[in-house]
Amino acid sequence: LILISCAVSSFVVEKAAANLALEAEKEAEDEIDTGEKILITLAYPDTVTEMVDFGLILKPEKNNVPVYALTIVSDDEDNNTSQASGKKMMEKAIEQAAAAENTIIPLMRYDMNISNAIIYTIKEQNITDVVIGLHKNANQKDFLGPIAENILSRSGETIFIYKNVQPFNTLNRMVVAILPNAERESGFQHWFSRILTIAKAGGLSFQFFASEPTISQLKKMNALSPSPVTALYNVFTSWEDFLILSRELKQNDLFVIVSSR
């Protein structure tokens, strides 16, 4: 029995290895190279995990879109302290990505101006999607903050300004409010494909609030998608009284506001 097993197993293993190699090669061919790149900016040590998780969710399956993580060392601070803090955040980001079987490309930049550092990184690396955390002192008068405002005014890429409230896997629905004439923006189809990716990753349903022309285009794009999502469409015109949308939100909703420049 041992003799037969040893003789047969070598042939079986050789054949299986050849089949595995062919499958791996086929999977590599199936991966799509869209020329897109995702950049995750790391600012606060206590939000690294959530920022990395969200940035990786933007990456479609079977897609070799590279994901970068950026830490910025400010020249006007103690370099050693700032560099050590940035290194710790980067190590945490790499570990978080590895736990999800993903790879992050680390970037560290020295600059006195944080928004400049992010803008130049976007240009140098040809980034298409940028994930920024909402600053901790956000209020009605200064919601986005000067860093995000500066990036938005000086770049044309899709910017995701993310505020984590609860674990992503506890969410059930995505409520999306879209400003009028969004369908005329050059990035309309791009951000729509990204939120479809987010919805598929989290198993979320959709509820849209937008103008009639925008809803018409959303329905067309959803129908043309390889895997359309379940969605409810609501005509919304009361942008002067935007806060009435809060009545539509539930505990486990992901609220998305699509703005424009």
Image: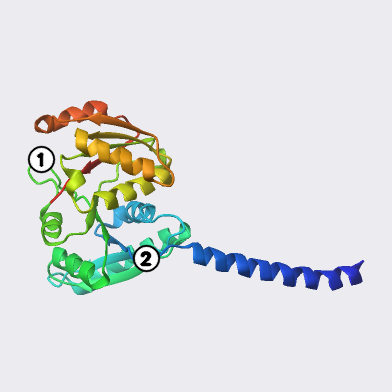
Q: Which mark is residue 140?
A: 1
Q: Kindly state the secondary structure of the residue where label 1 is placed.
A: loop
Nearest to N terminus: mark 1 or mark 2? 2
Q: Kindly state the secondary structure of the residue where label 2 is placed.
A: loop
Q: Amino acid at mark 2?
A: Pro
Q: Quadrant of residue 4?
A: bottom right
Residue 81 seen anywhere in this rendered image of the structure: no
Q: Amino acid at mark 1?
A: Gln
CB under 8 Å between discs 1 and 2: no
C-alpha separation, residue under disc 1 versus residue under disc 2: 35 Å
Residue 194 at x, y = what percent? 33, 50
Residue found at x 12% / y 67%: 113
Question: Closest to the observer: 7 or 97?
Answer: 7
Label 2 packing within 10 angstroms: few (<14), some (14-19), many (20+) = some
| Residue 89, above or below 53 | below
Left or right relative to 161: residue 59: right
Left or right relative to 182: residue 206: right
| Residue 58, above or below 14 | above
Residue 252 at x, y = what percent? 35, 34
Left or right relative to 217: residue 64: right
Residue found at x 21% / y 50%: 134
Q: Which mark is residue 66?
A: 2
Q: Quadrant of residue 76?
A: bottom left
Q: Comparing marks 1 and 2, which lies closer to the viewer?
A: 2
Q: Residue furthest right?
A: 1
Label 1 packing within 10 angstroms: few (<14), some (14-19), many (20+) = few
| Residue 213, above or below 24 | above
